[in-house]
Amino acid sequence: MFDKSVELFPIKQEIAYLANCGVSPMFSGAAAEMAAFCNARMLKGIAPIMDYPDILDSLRESLATITGAAPLNFAFMKNTAEAMSIIANGYPLNEGDEIISYVHEYPSNHYPWLIQQQRGAKLVLLDDIDPIGNLAPGKPRGWSLDDLERATTDRTRIVAISHVQFTSGFAADLAAVGEFCHSRGIDLIVDVAQSLGALPVRPEEFHISALAGSGWKWLLGPVGAGVMYTSPEFRAKIKITMTGPNSMTQGLNYLDHTWSLLDDARRFEYSSVQLSYAAALDKSLKLFCKYDPADVRDEIFRLQDLFIDRVDTDRYRPLIFAPANRSGILSMETDADIDTILTTLAEQGISLSSRGGYLRIAPHFYNDDAEIIRTAEALNAL
């Protein structure tokens, strides 16, 4: 069902690449699209820019296909941090309002909320739980819905969490968290950098007010291309803190300085965007449009299960979460030196990664069984 060919993924010629949670390889179609745009600019100047007037509309349509959300609720961003900063800085917070997050969040979804304390808001951080009962103390794990409920007060305005924690691979049950927030009138803001392209992400179904993510992890796109979703109701709350000609209805009529914001998410695409990046990311998204997100998730989990069956789990102890909290990242504890492991595997043409004291394996749908088995055997032989 999945196209795992070397033609689409030339990296397979040299490397068993299982670090898709870090920086994934671009698939060949995206790389070709970016190169074609840059080459045309080199030869024709502004002309190719005029040839790409609908690329952002196409990108929005692709995002709508894989998420089920309305196209004009999406904006093209440089990265997760840019989107989160726009959201956090524009949110109407008052003295004493509370934002709930997790103590080990990725910085792009921590610092934008941390600086809201300058406005008198309070950042409440959920502590770790040990959902499998046998982790070493002090390592990132995940958080519980019970703890979220206990932390929630009548001053809670926002819950800002990652769908998938980049260290442990713990995935929030977005359906449950979304229902919890929706029932209490709390805005749920989600960092989907570690899930969009690997897990189903349905913002309107899950009552998500806003989400942000990068395109160079599970979406197999270029570094420097990201996305932001805002619901119409949430978008109406956000004060504009970054603006430019692309935020306005006037289009190319730059001498008309009327304050006339676009109603949809395009108001956040405030100025010139990297069209070559957008074209490449859209090409990647078109690849994902061919597959059901649930099928992609199931293939990733199948490859993980194959790895668990083959690796020595006494030496490499995987974190096995409940099905609703499982993600594309399979993190492992080991007593061996992780840097030495990564270096030794790299010499054998195998790419894994580490964060937070864990060894991480993150296969994608393009990886095949042979790559998984080779990796497990290489680890066992160390």
Image (cartoon, helix red, strand yellow):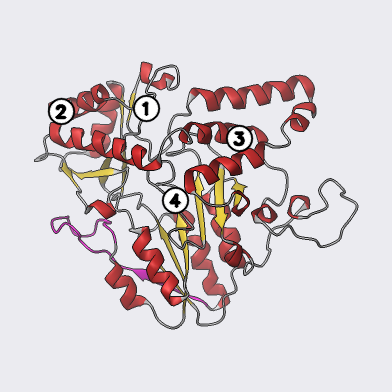
Please, what is the three-letter code of the amino acid marked with disc 1?
Answer: Phe
Q: Nearer the viewer, mark 4 or mark 1?
A: 1
Image position, residue 168 (x, y; %): 28, 50
Placement of 69 over or under 273, stated as above or below: below
Near-viewer residue (329 or 342): 329
Q: Which mark is residue 192?
A: 4
Specify start and end residues of the magenta stretch as a single range: 121-142
Can you see residue 274? no
**Of the residues under marks 2 and 1, which one precedes in the sequence?**
1
Please, what is the three-letter code of the amino acid marked with disc 3?
Answer: Tyr
Mark-to-mark CA distance, 4 and 1? 23 Å
**Of the residues under marks 2 and 3, which one precedes in the sequence?**
3
User: SS class of the residue under badge 3?
Assistant: helix
Placement of 279 over or under 63, stated as above or below: above
Q: Nearer the viewer, mark 3 or mark 1?
A: 1
Crowding at label 2, few (<14), some or many (≥20) Cα neighbours within 10 Å? few
Q: Which residue is mark 1?
A: 2
Q: Which mark is residue 15?
A: none
User: SS class of the residue under badge 1?
Assistant: loop
Q: Which residue is mark 3?
A: 277
Image position, residue 103 (x, y; %): 35, 64
Residue 138 placement: quadrant? bottom left
Q: Nearer the viewer, mark 2 or mark 4?
A: 4
Q: Which residue is mark 2?
A: 382
**Of the residues under marks 4 and 1, which one precedes in the sequence?**
1
